[in-house]
Image (tube, grey):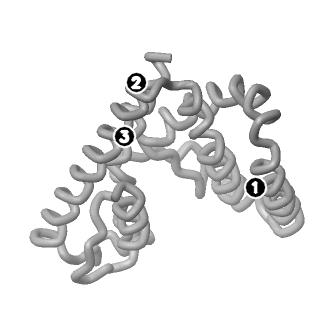
Amino acid sequence: MVKTQKLYYLLFGCLCMGVLLSISPFQGVKLYLYDFPAIILGFLSLFFLPKFWRKYKRNLIFVLPFLVVGLLGLFFTTVSLSNFLASFSYLARLVLYLLLPLPLLTLSIKNLKRITIAVVFSGFISVLVGFLQYIYYQDLANLYYLGWDRHLYRFFGTFLDPNFTGVYVVCVF
């Protein structure tokens, strides 16, 4: 379980980088730095899923119809392979993020407190970088050609989007 704990540290450490480091394996699909530890944790979560399915199936049963409708919508509305891969990547991320808490259920209270400290530290770094960005880099106009909005005089941080940055900061608080 110590390796799981270290993967969570890596995940929250990578979240500080936001979307600054990414690769694009296919057109329209981007993998960010924080996706890699999340993918590993997601695969580890699959081992915990049968154990927790019996205990939490009342909670999980409401998620499944939503995912099925999303998958059906994906197949009925996609016209090209690049659009399909881009859309599927969002659905895969949603499933991945839903699986992330499962390994946490096996950790001790002491280790959960340490992970909580890592989350707070990650949020602190994100807010600090965001304030520096707000003071020194107030306009994303030079990244407009890459598809980013200007976000003039907004706190967009390393996520390059004020909404995602705000959600992350609120979740950390």
Task: Name the residue that disc number 3 marks.
Answer: 116
For numbered disc 3, what is the local secondary structure?
helix
Asked if the residue under mark 3 is in contact with the one under mark 2, i.e. CB atoms within 8 Å, the reply is no
- Residue at 36%, 34% (x, y): give it: 113
Task: Name the residue that disc number 2 marks.
Answer: 6
Q: Is residue 151 above or below residue 68?
A: below
Q: Nearer the viewer, residue 3 or 72?
A: 3
Quarter holding the C terminus is: bottom left
Q: Is residue 126 left or right of residue 159?
A: left
Asked if the residue under mark 2 is in contact with the one under mark 1, i.e. CB atoms within 8 Å, the reply is no
Q: Is residue 134 left or right of residue 63?
A: left
Q: Earlier in the sequence, mark 2 or mark 3?
A: 2
- What kind of residue is marked 2? Lys
Image spot of residue 146 (x, y percent): 41, 67
Task: Name the residue that disc number 1 marks.
Answer: 81
Crowdedness of circle 3 by 10 Å Cα count: few (<14), some, many (20+)? some
